[in-house]
C-alpha cells in the first residue's frame, strides 16, 4: 500500500499568501497538513507556517520512537496542541504579529488507522472508490446555520457568514481540534483532499469525485480541479491550497 500525493499552494488574487502546507509520506505512514492564516490579522502567514511545520516535526519525532503510538488519537491531538503552543510562543517573541492565527487540517495514517483533526474551515475530505465518504464540519457561523437547518450545506460557499470562524489555532485560548478516527484500513482508490476555503469554495464535492475518478494520478486530478477554480474566481480571489492523496497498491 502506498500514498501518492500532489500539492498546490497559490497566492490567488491577494497581495501575499497566508496559506501553508506540509507533509511527510513513507512506506508505513503519512502526516498531511494544510493551514490557512487568517487574512485580516497581520502576520498570519507566520502562524500558518509555524503550525504546519510543528505538526510534521512532532509527528516525525514520535514516529521515530514508536510508529504505533504516532497514530494514536491522543498523540495526534498533542501535535496540534504543540503547534498552538509554538504559535503563541512566536507571537510573544514578535509583538507585531500578536493577533495572528490560523486554521489547520491534518490527516495522520499508518494505513490501518487514520486520524483526522481540524480547527477552522480548512477541510478534509475522505473518498472511497471515488465517492465522498466523509468531510469535516467547518467551525464557522455558516456551519452553525447548516446545523440549525437554516441553510443547506452547499450554500455555505455563498453565505454571508462563511468566513466568520468560531474556532482558530493560535488565539488566546485553545479549544482542541475535532478528531475523527477511522479504524478501517485504507484500500486502493481511497483518497483524501485537504484544502483551504479558497479552494473548496470554487470546487464542488461532486466535481472532486469526478476528477478523482477520471484521473490516474493525484497531479492529474489536482490540475483538473484547479482549472475549475480558475474558471470561476474573481480578480481578488483568496489564496488557495490543497493536498490530493490517493491510495494505491
Image (spheres, rainbow, N blue to C red):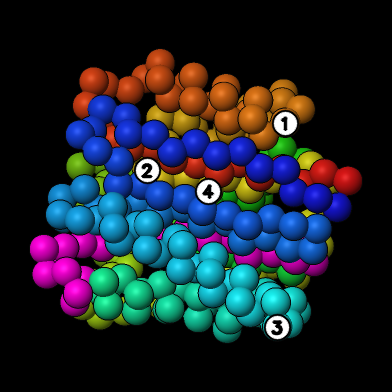
User: Which of pointers 3 and 1 lies earlier in the amino acid sequence?
Assistant: 3
User: Distance from label 2 to label 1 (Cα)?
Assistant: 23 Å
Residue placed furthest toward the right: 249
Res. 184 visible in picture: no
Q: Is residue 98 above or below residue 161?
A: below
Local packing at callout 3 (Cα closer than 10 Å; few below 14, some 14-19, many 20+) is few
> Which residue is label 4 attached to?
194
> Which residue is label 3 attached to?
65
Q: Residue at x 86, y 52 (%)?
A: 1
Q: Nearer the viewer, mark 4 or mark 3?
A: 3
**Magenta part of the protein: which range?**
91-112
Res. 195 visible in picture: yes
Residue placed furthest toward the left: 96
User: Distance from label 3 to label 1 (Cα)?
Assistant: 32 Å
User: Which of pointers 1 and 4 lies earlier in the amino acid sequence?
Assistant: 4
User: Which of pointers 4 and 3 lies earlier in the amino acid sequence?
Assistant: 3
> Which residue is label 1 attached to?
217
Give x and y (percent) for residue 39: 21, 48
> Which residue is label 2 attached to?
197
Amino acid at each position: 500500500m502506498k500514498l501518492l500525493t500532489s500539492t498546490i499552494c497559490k497566492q490567488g488574487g491577494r497581495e501575499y499568501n497566508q496559506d501553508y502546507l506540509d507533509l511527510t509520506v513513507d512506506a508505513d505512514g503519512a502526516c498531511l497538513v494544510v493551514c490557512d492564516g487568517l487574512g485580516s490579522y497581520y502576520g498570519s502567514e507566520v502562524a500558518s507556517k509555524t503550525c504546519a511545520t510543528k505538526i510534521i516535526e512532532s509527528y516525525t519525532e514520535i514516529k521515530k520512537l514508536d510508529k504505533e503510538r504516532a497514530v494514536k488519537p491522543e498523540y495526534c491531538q498533542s501535535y496540534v496542541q504543540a503547534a498552538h503552543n509554538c504559535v503563541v510562543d512566536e507571537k510573544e517573541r514578535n509583538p507585531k504579529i500578536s493577533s495572528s492565527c490560523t486554521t489547520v487540517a491534518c490527516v495522520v495514517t499508518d494505513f490501518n488507522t487514520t486520524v483526522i483533526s481540524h480547527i477552522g474551515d480548512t477541510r478534509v475530505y475522505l473518498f472511497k472508490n471515488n465517492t465522498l465518504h466523509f468531510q469535516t464540519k467547518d467551525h464557522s457561523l455558516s456551519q452553525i446555520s447548516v446545523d440549525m437547518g437554516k441553510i443547506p450545506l452547499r450554500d455555505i460557499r455563498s453565505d454571508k457568514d462563511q468566513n466568520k470562524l468560531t474556532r482558530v489555532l493560535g488565539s488566546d485560548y485553545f479549544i482542541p481540534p475535532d478528531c475523527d478516527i477511522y479504524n478501517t484500513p485504507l484500500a486502493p482508490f481511497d483518497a483524501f483532499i485537504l484544502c483551504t476555503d479558497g479552494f473548496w469554495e470554487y470546487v464542488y464535492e461532486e466535481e472532486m469525485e469526478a476528477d478523482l475518478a477520471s484521473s490516474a494520478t493525484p497531479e492529474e486530478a489536482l490540475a483538473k480541479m484547479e482549472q475549475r477554480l480558475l474558471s470561476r474566481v474573481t480578480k481578488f480571489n483568496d489564496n488557495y491550497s490543497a493536498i490530493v492523496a490517493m491510495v494505491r497498491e
